[in-house]
């Protein structure tokens, strides 16, 4: 295993002293069905640090879809149009998403902070809120004034156009606490590439093919999504930490990274061997697991629920996932096994501990 799921053994080069830190196994998960707002379906799309979830659900009689916030109870966030959809949630419970007007043709991004506030557009007719950070900054995409297509935006009291990678279209998907944004954009030659925005929009490239998509970003600016391999033979989940790493699939030709936490654990969905099915996955830094194999055998929903896509993961390892029958679920580790992000402070603690031990041994040797 590498450092995402197993703290590496560190070597203090001067004394060649090995500091071994224990490996961490993939956790097992209990399953909570989030229910609905009275209708027959719900979909969970994002999770925050507290394990709160947003998404959307059918109301009674399936007459509409409304954004919800789940904090142990499912709350209807309402809508300013016919329907609303929650797409992102921060640690304070602020939600972003979009509403759809009664005619079904006009969508507007919103920020919910106890009331649903319209974030406007970039001068065009529509906008979609996709991600929100701890400071309440929102990213998404909106039709740009005088543009042939939508552009990614950053909302900081007003909606700012992030531009493109040279093409006519871009879309913001996720934003971290530092205000870094990921998503995707068309290039000057009209290919779709994942980007990282940190004041400027950077092309993250591909895995050898012509297409990539940035879906989520963590506190360190690491990105997950999917990218085409050489010849566009497959579309594999990736993790970008300055370099795009191929995470593979569950045996089929497609895997999409949807969520990433501070430790670099990734969730998403993948086709299985022979393209027989689509299952949710968890990548723990070294291995891509079919998430359904990690459900606790003692859970009442074990063997009943099959998660097809895992939309997000928080830093304690809680996951929001959906099945194929319109049910949203919160998955909670039986014992949290997600390691803290590797830091210099942690490394320093190990090294200084070794140095203290060496000093004690040397002192004892001299006394003897």
Image (cartoon, rainbow, N blue to C red):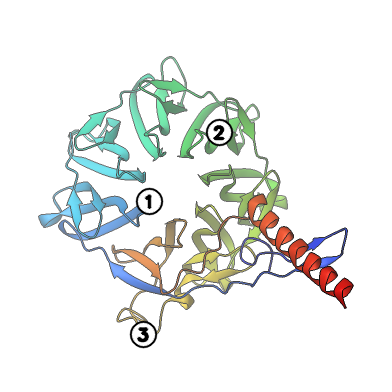
Where is residue 366? Give x, y as percent: 89, 71
Q: Which residue is mark 3?
A: 298
Where is residue 317? Give x, y as percent: 46, 62
Question: Which residue corresponds to the image point at 34% horizontal and 81% vertical from the top-left?
Answer: 299
Where is residue 296? Give x, y as percent: 41, 80
In-image side of 362 versus 302 (left or right): right
Taking 127 as reference, is 192 above or below it? below
Element at label 1: loop
Question: Which residue corresponds to the image point at 58% horizontal and 44% vertical from the top-left?
Answer: 220
Q: Quadrant of residue 105?
A: top left
Nearer to me, 58 or 338? 338
Of marks 2 and 3, the one in the foreground: 3
Taking 338 as reference, is 293 above or below it? below
Element at label 2: strand
Taking 269 as reference, is 259 above or below it? above
Callout 2 crowding tier (Cα within 10 Å): few <14, some 14–19, many ≥20: many
Callout 1 crowding tier (Cα within 10 Å): few <14, some 14–19, many ≥20: many
Question: Residue lying farthest left?
Answer: 61
Q: Which mark is residue 185?
A: 2
Nearer to me, 54 or 26? 26
Nearer to me, 173 or 149? 173
Q: Earlier in the sequence, mark 2 or mark 3?
A: 2
Q: Quadrant of residue 309?
A: bottom left
Question: Residue lying farthest bottom?
Answer: 298
In-image side of 64 versus 309 (left or right): left
Q: Which residue is mark 1?
A: 48
Query: In which quadrant of the rendered image does the C terminus lie?
Result: bottom right
Question: Residue lying farthest front?
Answer: 367
């Amino acid at each position: 295993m590498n450092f995402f799921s197993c703290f590496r053994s560190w070597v203090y080069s001067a004394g060649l002293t090995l500091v071994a830190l224990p490996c961490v196994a993939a956790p097992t998960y209990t399953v909570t069905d989030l229910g609905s707002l009275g209708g027959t379906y719900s979909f969970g799309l994002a999770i925050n640090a507290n394990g709160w979830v947003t998404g959307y659900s059918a109301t009674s009689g399936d007459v509409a879809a409304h954004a919800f916030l789940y904090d142990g109870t499912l709350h209807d966030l309402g809508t300013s149009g016919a329907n609303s959809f929650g797409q992102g949630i921060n640690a304070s419970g602020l939600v972003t998403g979009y509403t759809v007007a009664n005619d079904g043709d006009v969508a507007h991004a919103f920020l919910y902070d106890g009331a649903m506030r319209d974030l406007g557009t970039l001068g065009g007719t529509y906008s979609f809120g996709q991600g929100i950070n701890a400071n309440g900054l929102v990213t998404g995409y909106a039709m740009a004034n005088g543009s042939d297509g939508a552009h990614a935006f950053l909302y900081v009291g007003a909606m700012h156009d992030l531009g493109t990678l040279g093409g006519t279209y871009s879309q913001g998907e996720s934003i971290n606490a530092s205000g870094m944004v990921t998503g995707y954009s068309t290039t000057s030659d009209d290919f779709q590439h994942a980007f990282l925005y940190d004041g400027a929009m950077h092309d993250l490239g591909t895995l050898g093919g012509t297409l990539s998509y940035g879906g989520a970003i963590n506190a360190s600016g690491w990105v997950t999504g999917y990218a085409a391999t050489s010849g566009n033979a497959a579309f594999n989940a990736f993790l970008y930490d300055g370099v795009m790493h191929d995470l593979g699939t569950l045996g089929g030709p497609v895997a999409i990274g949807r969520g990433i936490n501070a430790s670099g654990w990734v969730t998403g969905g993948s086709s299985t061997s022979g393209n027989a099915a689509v299952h949710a996955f968890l990548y723990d830094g070294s291995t891509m697991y079919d998430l359904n194999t990690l459900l606790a055998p003692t859970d009442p929903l074990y063997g009943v629920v099959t998660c097809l896509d895992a939309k997000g993961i928080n830093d304690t390892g809680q996951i929001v996932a959906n099945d194929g029958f319109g049910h949203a679920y919160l998955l909670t580790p039986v014992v949290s096994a997600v390691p803290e992000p590797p830091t210099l402070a942690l490394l320093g603690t190990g090294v200084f501990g070794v140095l203290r031990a060496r000093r004690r041994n040397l002192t004892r040797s001299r006394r003897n």
